[in-house]
Structures are given as C-alpha cells and as structure tokens.
Amino acid sequence: MEVNFIPDILIVDDIEHNIFTLRSLIESQFEANIIEATSGEQVLRILNDRSIDLILMDVMMPGMDGFETARLIKNRPKTTNIPIIFISAFDPTQKLLEKGIAAGGFDYLTKPIDDNQLIYRLKMYLRFITHEFMMNLHLRELNQKLIEEIEERKATEETLQISREKLKTANAAKDKFFSIIAHDLKNPFNGIIGLSTLLVDDYDSFSVEEQKEFISDIKTTAENTFRLLQNLLDWSQTQTGKIHFEPEPFILETITTEIVDLVKISAGNKNITLDSIVPGDIQVYADKNMINTVIRNLLLNAVKFTRNGGRIILSAQNVGSIAEISVTDNGIGINEEHLTKLFTIDCNVVSYGTEGEQGTGLGLILCKEFVDKNAGAIRVESKLGVGSTFTVSLPVNALFY
C-alpha cells in the first residue's frame, strides 16, 4: 500500500520573524505540516493534543526556556522520542551545546542559520523519521495480519474442536446403538424364544397356571422389547435428522390421559398407583408426538424403578410463560454419580429395575433430545431410597422458537 508520509514539524520561537523565516525555508524544500509555538507552555499544550515528528526549538525564551521545555518533553512517555533540534546564538564555549544534549536535544544549530546546512540536516532527520514511520506502519500491518491469522487459527481450532466433539458424540451414539442391538434386543428375544420353545415342546406337561405364567412372561417381555425398539427407531431418526418436527399449541391433557391409561397396565402389574394431576387448561407449544414420547418414557421409567405397591404422580403447572410437567415416584432413587450421567450418550450407565428390568438409558437420552428440540429443559431431583422427580419445562407459546 502506497503511503505518502507528511511530517508534522513544530517551530518554537518567541520572535515571530524567526518562525516566519524557518517556515518559509522549510516549505520551499519539503512537504510538511508546520505548527507554531512562541513559548514552552504552548509547546506542552500542543503536545497534549496532537503528535509531532520533529521540533525546532529556540533556546532563549522568556519564562520557560528551551532546555527546561525539552526536559519536560523527554520526561513524558508519550513524547520522549520526539527529536529536538535546538537553535540559538553562536556558542564559542559550547556550554549551550552541552546543556542541549543533557536536556535531550537531538542536534544544535547556531544563529545566523546557514540555509544549506539547515536543509541538509532536515533532510537527514526527515529521512530518518520517514524510515521510522514506514517501519512502524509495516510493523502495524504485520501485527494486524498476525492478529487476523491468530483469529483465523483460533476459529479453525474452535471448528475442529466442535467437529471432534461431534465425532465423539457420533461414535458414542454408534457404540450405544450397536450395544443395544447386540445385547438389549438380543437378550429379550432369547427369553421369548426359550419360553415359547418350552410351551411348544412340553405344553401338556405344564399346569394351566404354569402355562399362563409362561404366556404372561412372553407378553411382558415382548411389550418391553417393543417399547425399546420404538425408542431405538425414534432415536435413530433424531441422529439422521429424519424425524418430523411440527410444533403447535395444544392442551397437555389431550395426550396425558391416553398415556396414563396405557402406562397403568404396566403399573398395575406391580400394584403401583398411578395418579394424574394435570389441569385441563395447561397449554404447551411443542411437537405433540415428541412430547407424547417424552411423558410416556418418563412414566414407564418410573414404573421400572418403583417397588411393588408404590406410587407415581404425573402433575403439571404453569410458571409464567413456561409449563412444567413432573413425574414423581417413591422408588429406589438414583445415586449422585449416575445423576450426572443420565442424559449423556457417551456415559454407559446400566441400571436395573425393582424386578430386575435392565435399563439402557436410551429412553432418558431420547427425552433430553426431544425436549431440547422443543426449546425446553429437563431436570431431575432424586434421593437414593426415597424416590425421584423428573421435570420437563416447555414453552406455552411460539416466542421461544
């Protein structure tokens, strides 16, 4: 980038004619911005307001002389590097020259000033100042490029980190998927096949009660396996982005009544009381099918971990612009270590219900993904041996989307 550097030169003299002479000489030879001052105090005020590249300063001025002014300039961090050229009367003893150097002067010229000598000196100084300016400009450009490169690398690293996290989650999801297929789906079918084989091969050797018990076990295992398969299919659709998402306003009770009736069958098998306390005026804005899946999973999960004869309560309430849906049980509870891992796909938490039902954790992970998708939140409070409460917060209108 082409830059035309024009220096700012401050001429300091208490005699206007001397300033005029210096100004005319400089402007005839250089392109420069000339600033004038007639006292040391005025110099300091000028330096407070603007930057100066070179100062030509008379020594003998009333009040604050040139040497004192120079010392104050050099004592200020902002102005300490400004070159100062002193101009004064002929000094055969060179004492003034020594004082000028001690005060921080860059050079010393005597009156009457030789025009050629002044022009030569100024050319030399301005060449130095221009070179310094261009170097600083170049350094600023390099610094800006370095900052941009650092920001670009930082952005790239952040992108890579996000990709690594996504890859880690994807791998964990894949491992979870295959684990469920290999074990959690395979094992129930082994039980179904084993019991049905006994019935086929030795049906007449069993009493009617034993036959009913076998058939009931097959039914229960098949139902549990079907629910697991349904969760697995729903979850796989969320991972591939193929699940249909259509949020709408609806009254919560329109889905909870049907869900409770369905889950009461499983709860009844363990003599668990399932109560629903969902007011008929609570509305949510969400995908109805997803929230149906969430509530059903939470209730079935509560049934699994509640002892025979226990109690589960489904409740809901409005909290401002949020609807809170809670599933509370007096079951076995969750220890603190497992609480932090409930909704994390890469943490393999294996748990067993009160009657040996194995939990994959997939249902809760699916709940979390569906709730997040619907601009909501899910939290859990639990105490080991006392019970658990899972609470889902959902918006009541479309403002959160």
Image (cartoon, helix red, strand yellow):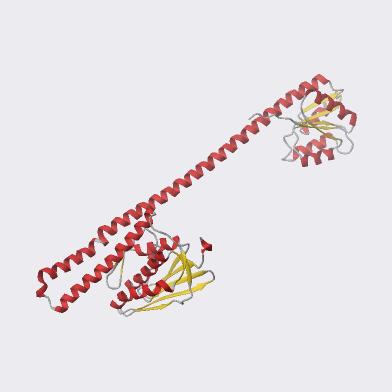
Q: Residue at x 27, y 73 (%)?
A: 355
Across and down, in percent, residue 14 comes to 89, 33
The answer to whether residue 252 is left or right of residue 274 is right
Across and down, in percent, residue 88 comes to 85, 28
Q: How many marks?
A: 0
Q: In the image, is residue 84 above or below residue 155?
A: above
Q: Nearer the viewer, residue 128 or 6?
A: 6
Does residue 194 appear in the picture of this structure?
A: yes
Q: Residue at x 75, y 23 (%)?
A: 123
The N terminus sits in image quarter: top right
Q: In the image, is residue 153 above or below residue 292?
A: above
The answer to whether residue 379 is left or right of residue 70 is left
Does residue 93 appear in the picture of this structure?
A: no
For residue 83, which quarter of the picture? top right
Q: Nearer the viewer, residue 352 or 159?
A: 159
Q: Residue at x 29, y 59 (%)?
A: 180
Q: Nearer the viewer, residue 278 or 28?
A: 278
Across and down, in percent, residue 298 comes to 38, 69
Q: Residue furthest top?
A: 116
Across and down, in percent, residue 103 comes to 78, 34
For residue 268, which quarter of the picture? bottom left
The answer to whether residue 227 is left or right of residue 86 is left
